[in-house]
Amino acid sequence: MERFSNLPHVASYYAETANDTTRHAPLEETLSVDVCVIGAGLTGISTALNLAERGHSVAVLEASKVGWAASGRNGGQLIGGFACDIDTFAKFMPADDLRRVWDMGLETLDIVRERIAKHRIDCDLTFGYLTAANKPRDTDALKRWRDDAQRRFGYDRFTYIDADGMGAYVQSQRYLGGLFDAESGHLHPLNYTLGLARAACAAGVRIFEDSCASALRTESGQHVVETARGKVRARFVVLACNTYLGKLAPDVARKIMPVGTYVIATEQLDPDRADALMPAKAAVCDSRFVLDYFRPAPDNRLLWGGKVSYSTIAPRDLGTAMRRDMLKTFPQLEDVNIDYAWGGFVDITMNRAPHFGRLSPTVYFAQGFSGHGVNTTGLAGKLIAEAISGQASRFDLFDKIRHRDFPGGAALRTPALVLAMTWYRMKDLL
């Protein structure tokens, strides 16, 4: 597991093109607030902003910098719904509640659009998202998903693209068809996170960087969160640490697994060449379990993600390894250089459903976004704020989902997952 860094952000295309250099001083006092949020990624900042808008005083403690971890390093894909199949939720709730969860999956996209518009966040928001089929069986699965969404939920915004039409989205012979969603899309995740942080500060939130929460305890009916040089006393605490939850809540941390995911950015292409590569400017992911995902950047680069590592060990010579994968889809980029290569950890749950809940009536957590964090974090922040304000019915829908610990304990769970993922990689090849 990587250590926290005193540098602003991990070297990446996103860090190089960040449009906000605001830094927040570390906590060096004892502070009393209504709510202490631990973690200044998308989950924590979204929660803090929603709480401040409801009139709560909020302090955010961040071990490194705003957006330093997955929120500022991910593939930037904005995908409606959740990482798991909708029937994962159906095991735990009746049909009426399932429909509410479906609607909240679409609401995640509305939240992002509304935040960007309201706070004038410059983050290259672009609409259009395509799931590309690698195998004939995948084309059938995508058509079933389109038909099920229409039949069960009245959702008619998925468009199936046959093989002849794929050239409008991706100039590659690798894919047999795809499912297009005009409501989803992609953005610059670090600039989006930094924009939310500016909005939160304007609403009265106090953010403290380089302020790792080392202890959480209860004292005289209040929670006390300690850092190296200060303390926060609060009526409520929100744990928004994801893969960095650590010893603050070990029972919760056992229900997520850190997974390495990696991205490269090509050099800038000639504009005509970039336009021809992905004419619709949509984000794309393929249909494999261990998938590739990619999208165009506004300055005519290709951003390519994948090479998922379940061992938490980054691939050797990351840029070269990722480039080889990219060329399997785009052999016409053989002459193109890679300018940036980076990665980091996202958190997954066993069933890929988001994990929202409480450690106690006044300590909340949200984690396990499993690759859908760009938009689902916005919903998490909204629901936690609703619950703390006394309207918990929507939050409690997610608390109904039973999440299992990853097997094997601290020593063996990563090797066990590596073995399981090897099986899925083999299935992808069949």
Image: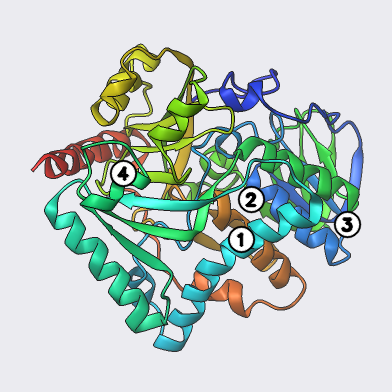
Q: For the point 53% across and 41% down, which residue is it?
A: 76
Q: Which residue is mark 1?
A: 380
Which label number is shown at residue 167?
A: 4
Badge 3: few (under 14), some or many (20 or more) residues near its Cα, within 10 Å? Answer: some
Q: Position of residue 258 (x, y in %)?
A: 43, 38
Q: Earlier in the sequence, mark 2 or mark 4?
A: 2
As displayed, is residue 367 above or below residue 8? below
Q: Position of residue 117 (x, y in %)?
A: 75, 55
Callout 4: SS: helix
Badge 1: few (under 14), some or many (20 or more) residues near its Cα, within 10 Å? Answer: many
Q: CA distance from mark 2 to mark 1?
A: 7 Å
Q: Nearer the observer, disc 4 or disc 1? A: 4
Q: Earlier in the sequence, mark 4 or mark 1?
A: 4
Q: CA distance from mark 4 to mark 3?
A: 51 Å
Give the residue type at disc 1. Answer: Ala
Q: Front-most of 253 and 335?
A: 335
Residue 260 visible here: no
Q: Which residue is mark 3?
A: 57
